Amino acid sequence: MRANSNARTGGEVLVDQLLTHGARHAFCVPGESYLAVLDAFYDRDLKVTVCRQEGGAAMMAEAVGKLTGRPGICFVTRGPGATNASPGVHIARQDSTPMILFVGQVARETRDREAFQELDYRAVFGSMAKWATEIDAVERIPEIVSRAFYTATNGRPGPVVVALPEDMLTERVAVADARPFEPIETWPGLTDMTRLQKLLWAAERPIVLLGGSRWSQPAWAAMGRFAEKFQIPVATTFRRAHLFDATHHCYAGDLGIGPNPKLLARIKSADLIVLVGGRLGELPSQSYTLLGIPGPQVKLVHVHPGAEELGRVYRPDVAINAAPTAFAAALEGLEPPREIRWRGEAHAAHADYLAWSEAPTEIPGAVNLGEIMVWLRNELESDAILCNGAGNYSGWIHRFYRFRHFTTQLGPVSGSMGYGLPAAVAAKRLYPDRTVICFAGDGCFLMNGQEFATAVQYELPIVVIVVDNGMYGTIRMHQEREYPKRVSATALRNPDFAAYARAFGGFGASVETTAAFAPAFEAARKSGKPAILHLKLDPEAITPAITLGAIREKALARQSG
Ligand SMILES: Cc1ncc(C[n+]2csc(CCOP(=O)(O)OP(=O)(O)O)c2C)c(N)n1
Ligand SMILES: [Mg+2]
């Protein structure tokens, strides 16, 4: 067996560990610092995606972590490669996504001289990664890579950074592969579930909020059955809408930025909140105003796989240290009270959600993004994957699209721009048979627009919808609210994005009216190529609910009043 021959370089041992632990994909930008790894890629069964910038590569690896629940793998070179990759590491941190970033490092004998592109990765990534380390001895590769897989996935998942001294990777060693890692399940105890059952039996107006990671298809299904059995309203939190079927009659909607006021009122009037998997961070908590800190004014059951997250911000009445996967399975053992006092509430909550999301709002201009979302939700297969970055354009997805399956949404909870395109490339690499759509603002798209070349290189027919309003719209919105009429550093002069697509070898079309969208979308799909649809959105259409001008007028009135 290879494992016991002494023919392997450090690079080969490393790649063999990844395969042993079940990795099938790696995303990289090459560097001379890890040539021995590139060489090991040459004849091993790992699908390598070579990218155009490390930010994109790291976000692709993060997206794999989000989709599979197993660490996404990224390789970058030292100094500039590592710093370029940092946005992906930050997303994995905030979004609780398992990911391993391998970084080339200078040779051991030159360390600490600030050799070419040398950085101390433990220090650089110390506050961003769950664990940042360096492999000093080639024979310890199996041990450290195994630990990286366990660390990235256990408790609250997150990013691990492993630096690889160049000379360590070329050393030959006889070492056995580690045994495949097994993700550690975190089960709720019987007492936990009994306490939850008691709170549910005593509740008048309970509601469930879903978020975080460590979900699975069976957990998704079990949560649907629990909601049904208990007739309990279930809302999803910011960019986690795919955790519950939007067409389920208990679905209460999406608790993100600018949520349905009726959903907010429902949560505020609840007497029991069961928060599963998430942290109820700044955005879903409406800037930490929804629940009292540290003591919520309502009974709170907080279920989270990371013990360190329980009681960190909100003091729960019952803290359950469990992964959503295990918790959802344990829910099957709970019985609803004989008489459900809140009967009718789930239907009412779902009716509120439907009323909020059913019909697109009127917005200025010839393109109505709401109508396009409604068309897409009727048209797309229910397992289509929708990706996006950060920007006001995403508000239309969150409000009007209906996520009906687990792993159909890839969006940065961390609010990182530029995420949509790399996420779409990764999703299509993993699932060639699923429809993958990327939404990006004009600002967002050009943060990682170079990865369109990666889509072309790997022949990935994704459809990218660039929503062009000629500005960093979100910031302009905040600007008009705080400093009306003083527009500063938020305007953008944009390229012809359709021509951009064609120049890269993809399909491109401009869409200037709502009616032109459907035929352009069909043509994009028919082309079989990666495609960009350049959507011209009126800058006044800043959200589905309010115009830019109205925000400015309100601010001016406030100033003069
Ligand atoms: C990497 C990164 N840089 C800056 C920001 C701050 N930011 C949030 S939204 C936004 C503007 C987004 O512009 P665009 O993609 O055009 O979307 P729009 O808001 O216009 O719909 C900016 C600059 C961010 N969230 N992420
Ligand atoms: Mg914009």
Image (cartoon, rainbow, N blue to C red):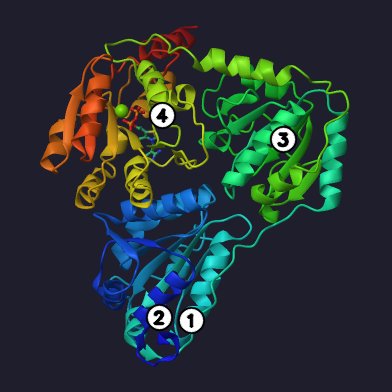
Kindly check if marks 1 and 3 are in contact, taking CB atoms under 8 A apart as contact.
no
Q: Nearer the viewer, mark 3 or mark 2?
A: 3
Kindly check if marks 3 and 2 are in contact, taking CB atoms under 8 A apart as contact.
no
**What residue sits right under mark 4 in the picture?**
394
User: Where 151 sits versus 246, above or below?
Assistant: below
Q: Quadrant of ligand 1?
A: top left
* Secondary structure state at the residue bearing disc 3: helix
**What residue sits right under mark 3 in the picture?**
226
Kindly check if marks 2 and 1 are in contact, taking CB atoms under 8 A apart as contact.
yes
What amino acid is labelled 1 in the image?
Answer: Asp
Q: Is mark 2 within 8 Å of ligand 1?
A: no
Front-most of residues 47 and 541: 47
Front-most of residues 105 and 349: 349
* Residue 292 coordinates in the image, percent (x, y): 73, 32
What amino acid is labelled 3 in the image?
Answer: Phe
Task: Give the mark, 1 or 3, whose residue is nearer the N terminus.
Answer: 1
Q: Point out which mark residue 13 bears.
A: 2
What amino acid is labelled 4 in the image?
Answer: Ser
Q: Nearer the viewer, mark 4 or mark 1?
A: 1
Question: Disc 2 to disc 1, how far (Cα)?
Answer: 8 Å
Question: Disc 4 to disc 3, how far (Cα)?
Answer: 30 Å
Task: Give the mark, 4 or 2, whose residue is nearer the N terminus.
Answer: 2
Q: Residues within 10 Å of mark 3 (few under 14, many from 20)?
A: some
* Secondary structure state at the residue bearing disc 2: helix
